[in-house]
Image: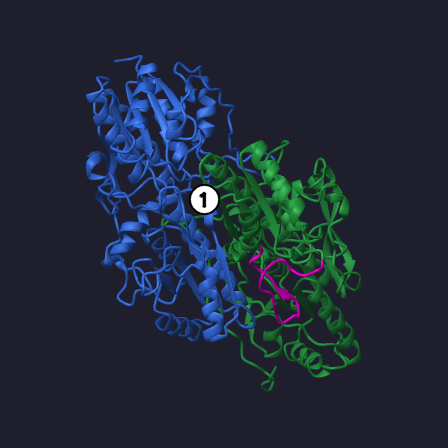
Chain colours: A green, B blue
Amino acid sequence: MAGRTYLYAQSGGVTPVINATAAALIRAARASGDRVLAARDGILGVLEERLIDTDRLSDRDLVAIGHTPGGVFGSCRYKLKGMEDNRREYERLIDVFRAHQVDCFFYNGGNDSADTALKVSRLGESMDYPIQCIGVPKTIDNDLAVTDNCPGFGSVAKYVAVSILEASLDVMSMASTSTKVFILEVMGRHAGWIAAAGGLAARAPGDPPQIILFPEIPFDQQRFCAAVRQSVEQNGYCSVVVSEGLRNPEGEFVAAAASRDAFGHHQLGGVAPAVADIVKRELGYKYHWAVSDYLQRSARHIASATDVEQAEAVGEAAVAMAQAGQSGVMPVIRRISDQPYQWEIATAELDQIANHEKKMPREYITEDGFGITEPARRYLAPLIRGENFPPFDEDGLPQYLRPELVEIETRLPAFRV
Amino acid sequence: MAGRTYLYAQSGGVTPVINATAAALIRAARASGDRVLAARDGILGVLEERLIDTDRLSDRDLVAIGHTPGGVFGSCRYKLKGMEDNRREYERLIDVFRAHQVDCFFYNGGNDSADTALKVSRLGESMDYPIQCIGVPKTIDNDLAVTDNCPGFGSVAKYVAVSILEASLDVMSMASTSTKVFILEVMGRHAGWIAAAGGLAARAPGDPPQIILFPEIPFDQQRFCAAVRQSVEQNGYCSVVVSEGLRNPEGEFVAAAASRDAFGHHQLGGVAPAVADIVKRELGYKYHWAVSDYLQRSARHIASATDVEQAEAVGEAAVAMAQAGQSGVMPVIRRISDQPYQWEIATAELDQIANHEKKMPREYITEDGFGITEPARRYLAPLIRGENFPPFDEDGLPQYLRPELVEIETRLPAFRV
């Protein structure tokens, strides 16, 4: 089976460890004498036949890529339309696979990518080019179905827990005369997984963050203000984590401005200043707010060792599945036990994952809607364990690599997306 | 000289390493058989006679405090008024020193604190309680006069350089179809030192951040938009660091909302969304923005080793100065050479520091106003060198200590601030 050709593409929002998956996948293929092409800018690079021969990357490059945040080959937000409306693009994918004799397509992404991979694998058969398609999981939002957790999430969770702990130590030292309320906005879209991770910083009653605002719990301004006041009276300050996807009881985003991205999702941001304004108006407390935005999902310097290990494991497992002739599947993480935390890689069918969204169970949120429960803690805690610092150079900066990427010659006529 | 009593207080905004100074100072005093009282909540705790006996902290506690962000004894934003308007508070300070037989008062802060320490040292003589006063430098803004740099700044500088590097790797992987402009807002008030530190991430032409917006350079919207467009056309994306203190040509803050803090300074925040809005309106590019706010000044997990070393050195030197009978002085950092970076602790007079502000030299900013020059790089680079990660616990969180602080019995009637 040696000498096979794979095509790897990254999809959607990147994570601190998506390159760990890429590097592990390429390394595993290389070890078996297989070859990996990588698409520039995700599925767009496949359609446009902009392909990198990863054989030009040295083993040392691969190590450095493995601890570099962002998507080393580029990613994209581009969802293929349904096959009925857009057979042309699907057929082009098969044409590209055929032109480069690709045996297996690895699509490293979330729900949308699983859907694309599934459709492509089915089309191949009917077009007489039976391409294997394997999804490789990735999303900071942790909202993929079937898998116990998603590579990328653990590192963002660690960043959020560490950051709210640190900022809370700051605000508690200033609270006597200055800032009394600190608000940190985090990502996660419609799922509160990332916000919940902030709760890992609170290990004893009264610990910060005293309030988490989840997208799953409609925002009740009056109850929120009462909780802030109570914390300030009891602790001298109040530390708040708020999810970008927070909605009011009418179902509208609390964030002032919402525009739409290429997937038709709302692009969120700016809920922290909106909540801060409520604190000032209703309670008169001095506040500070932070919006971590891309910082949280690129903070490879504070990656979770567990997350890095799992990101590598799904990359390696994807190659093994390809070599075993599997298609329409995804390597997922199956939890064996919480304590000690044990996990293994299992195989999931893409049609169980495509276009599903894993919401956070209501029992992970405390009854008052402002905190996480013990089951949530048991689930989340192992995912941020262990540190995996990147090497730093003599200038005091992480040794991140932006390798020169040379595209191979095209074999097909140009294609307009 | 053994058996002396010192009083230590933290002032103003805290830093990731102010506790490193506190721990080193207490350790140095302890090693000489001297005793350190610490005021709760800075100068307020002195006025209100809320004092901690640091002898109750174990050596192990001190090690943990030394790598914990925030101000372990509490800080405050409270500037004593001029002596003419407010002799009462100054006399109260002397009363408290006298009641607890304090030989030397260490005030760990910035410009304002140097001013207070100076006034108190002069008043003591006239009140026949000749208290020694020693300022200990601290400020993330790096705007203290005389000292080559300020403890606290190097770690924030490292956080900003690492963060903009990481977020830029993220945006460059998404730029083909999604976000093209990323904007990171940083602190620094009227001085561009922290914003300049972002420039350390750019080591080759075209590297991110492509644009830095300094408070020293009036914001020219048209030139800014042209620079953003040029970077997007050349690099595919544009990465921007903007200082909270950015002003328009009329001298007004670009940040939408500005309120005033207890020192009469503007409280800033929210310039990133304002700049993002310009990008969207004038150029139509998709953008993301982050406001790091307290995260940057509490991020002990990514502290600069140089900064930690200097923070400890000023604490130790303060004790040595006290033991040498000095007063009205501050230990400062004197740079001996850039390459190799060498520094030593020198002694500065408080009246050279009080109420001065060190602006960034114009020659540290490139002619176009959007970047840092080689001299700036030579100055800044050594300050972020080296890593000093805190120890992490088995839960994957830094081992930060919030010790129980027991106040000693008061010896004076209550005092109302």
Front residue of A371/B163: it is: A371
Q: Which quarter of the image is occupied by the C terminus of chain A? A: bottom right
Front residue of A108/B381: it is: B381
**What secondary structure characterizes most of the magenta part?**
loop
Question: Quick one: which residue is furthest to the bottom in this view?
Answer: A413
Crowd class of label 1 (few under 14; some 14 to 19; many from 20; radius 10 Å): many
The segment highlighted magenta reads: A250-271
Q: As drawn, is B400 to the left or to the right of B20?
A: right
At which x and y percent is residue A142?
Answer: 68, 54
Q: As drawn, is B186 to the left or to the right of B88?
A: right
At which x and y percent is residue A18?
Answer: 59, 58
At which x and y percent is residue A153?
Answer: 63, 51
**Residue A87 visible in the picture:** yes
Residue A257 within the segment the image draws in magenta? yes
* Chain containing mark 1: B
At which x and y percent is residue B292?
Answer: 47, 51
Q: As drawn, is A91 to the left or to the right of B387?
A: right
Q: Which quarter of the image is occupied by the N terminus of chain A? A: bottom right
Q: In the rendered image, which residue does mark 1 sit on? A: B302
In the depicted structure, whether residue A383 falls above or below residue B211 = above
Front residue of A101/A350: it is: A350
Q: Identify the secondary structure beneath mark 1.
A: helix
In the depicted structure, whether residue A104 falls above or below residue B314 = below
Front residue of B393/A348: it is: B393
Res B261 quadrant in image: top left
In the depicted structure, whether residue A174 falls above or below residue A55 = above
Count of residue discs: 1
Which residue is depicted at the point 52% across and 61% down?
B170
Which residue is depicted at the point 59% across and 79% down?
A48
**Residue B33 visible in the picture:** no
Residue A376 within the segment the image draws in magenta? no
Q: The residue under label 1 is which amino acid type? A: Ile
